[in-house]
Each structure stands twice: as structure tokens, then as C-alpha cells.
Amino acid sequence: MPRINLLPWRDGQRKERKLAFLVALGVAGLAAGVTAFAAYLMYGSMIESQQHRNNELRAEIKTLDKQIEEINNLESSKQKYIARMEIIEKLQRSRPEIVHVFEAIVRTLPEGVYLTAVKQDNKRLKFDGVAQSSTRVSSFMRNIDGSQWLRNPELQVVQTSKTGPGSSFTLTADQVSISGADENAATKAAKGKIRKASAAAGARQ
């Protein structure tokens, strides 16, 4: 005798589909969880790697900052050293100049003029003295103007003495550097040649 299934076949099929859907949903959820976990691990690894690189970059930047600071210190030391060398060279160049200047002062002093003080401010010289007359002071200024190591004489003060003959005076002049002295010497030599040539031409006439 044949068996007859009295249960509705559609309900059984619906249950099978529901079960299959739940299984598929569980598998999809599991796969999504695994994927999310894998992505989390991957991004965490990438972030950790980037942080490691950032730390290395920060360390390199600190090292470079120290090197830059050392370079700046070396540059500053170099500039100070160069400035000292320039000062030393300037002093070495000016050492013979002052000897020539004092020699020029002695040579330019005419008879009857006496200096009581000589002051120097950079390249400017100030002379205080006593002269027997104002003519002697004028002669002193002409001698300074014709000197190789002195130039631009300027009379500041002339006072006639009330107690005796003579006048006290104050005048200033510029010290000529070595290059300026050479230039003055060349100019004076050229002027001398012109004067000699003029005198010779006049004699011929």
C-alpha cells in the first residue's frame, strides 16, 4: 500500500530555503568578520609601519638640526676668525704708517713752532701747539699739505698770547694710508716732472 505525505510540500521547501538562507547569512557574516579582522590587522600594520617611519624621520630631522646648528656655529667662528685676521692685518699694515706719520710731523714743523699735544682719532690728527707768529702756523699748514703722509690741514683755533710773544693754535689733519701715500707720491712726482718740463721750455725760449 503506497504512503502518502500529507504535509504541505511548500512549507517543507520554505523551511529548506530559510535554513539555506540562514546558513548563507552566517557564512557571509563570518566572511565579513574575517575580512574586517584582516583589514584591521592590515591597516594596523600599515599605521604601525608609518609611525615607525615617522619616528625615523623625526630622529633624522633632529640629527640634521644638530648638524645645521654645528654648521652655523662653524660659520660664526669662521666670520670671527676672519674679522680677527683682518684686524691683525690692519694693525700690521698700520705699524709702519705711524712711524712715517711721526717722521712727517717732525719734518713739517717749521722753526718757531712747538707742539704741546698730538691726538689721533681714527685717521684724524689734532695738533695743539705754540708758534712765534701766525705766519709760522701758515707755514706749518703748507708743509702738511705738501707732506706725503698728511693732508687736508684745517686751522681750528688761533689765540695770541697775552703774557708774551707767540700764539697758541689748534689744527687738524688727515693721516694718509699706504695706498694714499703712494698715490700722493705719484701725483707729486708727476707735478714735479711738469714743472721741470715747463722750466726747460721757458729756458729754451
Image (cartoon, rainbow, N blue to C red):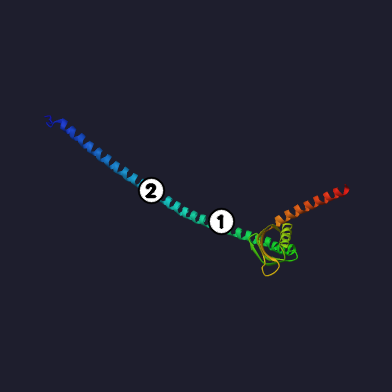
**Crowding near the residue tagged with mark 1, few <14, some 14–19, many ≥20 C-alpha atoms within 10 Å:** few
Tag 2: amino acid: Ile
- In this picture, is 11 found above or below 150? above
Q: Say which mark, if any, is on residue 1.
A: none
Residue nearer the viewer, 172 or 35: 172
Q: CA distance from mark 1 to mark 2?
A: 41 Å
Image check: 64 left or right of 186? left
Q: Is residue 105 above or below residue 3?
A: below
Asked where in the image residue 122 lies, by quadrant, the reply is bottom right
- The answer to whether mark 1 and mark 2 are in CB contact below 8 A is no
Residue assigned mark 1: 75
The x, y position of residue 79, in whole percent, is: 58, 57
Identify which amino acid the numbered label 1 is placed on: Glu
For the residue labelled by badge 1, is the local secondary structure a helix, a strand or a loop?
A: helix
8 sits left or right of 126 in the view:
left
Label 2: few (<14), some (14–19) or many (≥20) C-alpha neighbours in 10 Å: few
For the residue pair 168 and 193, the one nearer the viewer reads as 168
Identified at 85% across, 48% down, the residue is: 202
* Secondary element type, mark 2: helix
Q: Residue at x 83, y 51 (%)?
A: 196
| Quadrant assignment for the N terminus | top left
Q: Position of residue 187 (x, y in %)?
A: 75, 52
Q: Which mark is residue 47?
A: 2
- Residue 14 in the image: x percent, y percent? 18, 33
x, y percentage for residue 33?
A: 29, 43
